[in-house]
Image (cartoon, rainbow, N blue to C red):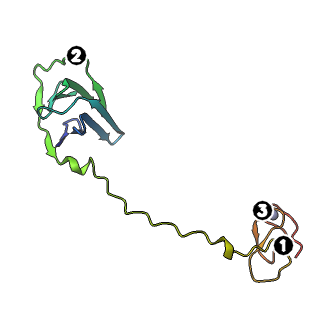
Amino acid sequence: MAYTANLPTGERVYLANPKEQTKINSSFSSPSQQQSQSYSLSTGKWTVPPTLFKTRNAAIVRIEAAGGQFFLELQRGSIRVLGELPDLMGAEILPLQPESEAEVEDNWQEMPPMRPMSPMRMGNMKMEMGKPESSSLKAKFCPQCGAAVNKSDRFCAQCGNLLTT
Ligand SMILES: [Zn+2]
């Protein structure tokens, strides 16, 4: 299960718990600023859903997981792991919306099996290097640099070589 929340400050928070990890993304956008940060933390499986607190100048996420209790501070799209218990006196608890984790995580589509490539058929390619004078309708190539040139060109557009035919 994943959780999302829209903070009153305009940030959008996404929390998920795949593979013993807590993944958190915070994105903040205002007309003048856009910022997004993702953070992955080894917490173990959550024992209870995370709690989101709104303090005076930031939002705090509390993760209670097999690996212990973790606090993350979200501020204007940036994420910081708190090393000590934050002061949650008077903090307001904000609702987190459950969201299907499958929409964001583990949604890799299986690639269809690759078709084996048909072998190159070099034997059918006619090498005409030996007769540059050939007046066939085939494209001409500059004898000096090998660039394709028009039949009517007097000089190679690539290297400037004088074309003799
Ligand atoms: Zn050339």
* Amino acid tagged 2: Glu
Query: Which residue lies at the image location 26% right of the left edge and 48% below the top edge?
Result: 104
Q: Quadrant of residue 163?
A: bottom right
Q: Is residue 99 above or below residue 159?
A: above
Q: Is residue 22 above or below residue 110?
A: above
How dense is the environment of label 1, judged by Cα within 10 Å: few (below 14), some, or many (20 and up)?
A: few
How dense is the environment of label 2, judged by Cα within 10 Å: few (below 14), some, or many (20 and up)?
A: few
Q: Which mark is residue 130?
A: 1
Nearest the eye: 119 or 126? 119
* Amino acid tagged 3: Gln
Q: Quadrant of residue 17?
A: top left
Query: Which residue lies at the image location 30% right of the left edge and 33% below the top edge?
Result: 40
* Amino acid tagged 1: Gly
Q: Mark 2 highlights which residue?
A: 84
> Which residue is at the far bottom?
136
Q: If the picture is divided into quarters, which one holds ligand 1?
A: bottom right
Query: Which residue lies at the image location 79% right of the left edge and 77% below the top edge?
Result: 151
Asked if marks 1 and 2 touch (Cβ < 8 Å), the reply is: no
